[in-house]
Amino acid sequence: MKRADLLINNAAGIVTCASVSGPRRGSQMSEIGFIASASIAVQSGIIVAAGPADEIASTYDSNRNIDAAGRMVIPGFVDPHTHAVFSGNRLGEFEQRISGASYLDILASGGGIHSTTRATRSASADDLIRGSLPHLVKMLELGTTALEVKTGYGLDVENELKLLEVIAELDRIQPIDLVPTFMPAHAVPPEFAGHTIGYVDLIIEEMLPAAMEWYERSHFSLDNRPFFIDVFCEQNAFDLLQSERVLAAGRALGMKVKAHVNEFTNLGGASMAVALGAVSIDHLDANSPEDIDLIAASPAVAVITPAVNFNLASRHYADARSLIDAGAALALTTDFNPGSAPCYSMPLVMAIACRYCCLTPNEALIASTINAAYAAGIGDRVGSIEVGKQSDLLIVDIGDVRQLSYEMGGNPVEIVIKKGEVVCGDE
Ligand code: NIG
Ligand code: FE
């Protein structure tokens, strides 16, 4: 008999979401890897075996056993695109939008990202840690075990570095693994109003080198977690050329590339991001047919944000069906932020994506686990139940995988296991 630190027994089934190499693409997104009556063995936080219960029982023994009690076990959700560190809220704008104001009009008139930037600049790092921690607690309870988090509400050297420090401290003090993304090109700050090029120069000359230096000293670099550069390529934010300059400069320093493109306006950002070797290309609401083919043929993961469309009461959603049918690897995200998506829940995003983006429930699960992990640059360590992966697992109270997307607004997650430890729920 082999010894394991932990055995998870008596699951009605496990859904592995396994993928041989890279994210699941196109029609492969329908295959979720279901094993009925299964168990999982964990050693030092890593999965050492996952398979039929009788096989595991005849091979592994442990002093620590968790009884899944006939429930299912799935990989922890990975949320690959959030703006989770900010101060204040946007309740006033929520009401303005209900009365007919648009997201881009509010941004152009100095609200939106600018209003959160004002609040975030005047908050201390400690205030931001105290304010952001409850968001992460809610996400963990809903089954998110890894999370990409962007800066982008500091918009100057000092405040963007403050946000990176906050992300690092949040990573240390709670169980969710964070992946940092530097996003000074989220909006043009007021001191550069009408002079975007001056701000882009500041980003390239000062902010990116300072951020890279921060990363190289950080525990993220020691742990081999990636560091991303991201940009908001949009009207009243950064045009195509400005976006390309920022991403190319970040890439030259060693950052991996992400981009917000085609959220409201198609400025040509999708082909620019593909050409720069983006790991993920995000939003994709206003894609052209050429964009869809280009993204599908590229290694980039297409990340869609249906909670944004839902929150902005849009009737238009990203055409995920065409992306998957063209062979793309698609991922889902909450895009959690105080303006366009105050949404914590990956299960709710799955529910919306199935209804409005025509994903099947199986595709929605793959898009929230293994593909989301690749979009966050950590697909080699999380996102699936496979030997060698981190044991980030959810015990969910469902009898059928389709139930995860079918139900709306509840929480199917009963127990969250992070690196072999129960971090939410009662065993
Ligand atoms: O992904 N679009 C740009 N950034 C966020 C919104 C940020 C905000 O409104 O504060 C997004 O939708
Ligand atoms: Fe975003």
Image (spheres, helix red, strand yellow):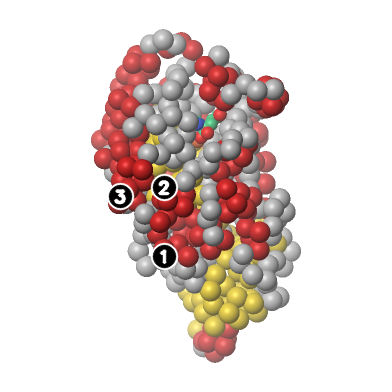
- Which residue carries the number 2 mark? 302
Q: Residue at point 30% right, 35% down?
A: 272
From the viewer's side, name the closer residue of 161 and 269. Answer: 269
The quarter in which the C terminus is drawn is bottom right
Q: Residue at point 41% right, 50% down?
A: 323
Q: How many marks?
A: 3
From the viewer's side, name the closer residue of 125 and 235. Answer: 235
**What amino acid does circle 1 point to?**
Gln
- Which residue carries the number 3 mark? 298
- Which residue carries the number 1 mark? 28
Q: Does any atom of ligand 2 lie closer than 8 Å to the CB of label 2?
A: no
Q: Secondary structure at mark 2?
A: strand
x and y percentages locating residue 347 in the rendered image: 62, 53
From the viewer's side, name the closer residue of 78 and 365. Answer: 365
> Marks 1 and 2, Cα distance to the nearest angstrom?
15 Å
Q: Quadrant of residue 115?
A: top right
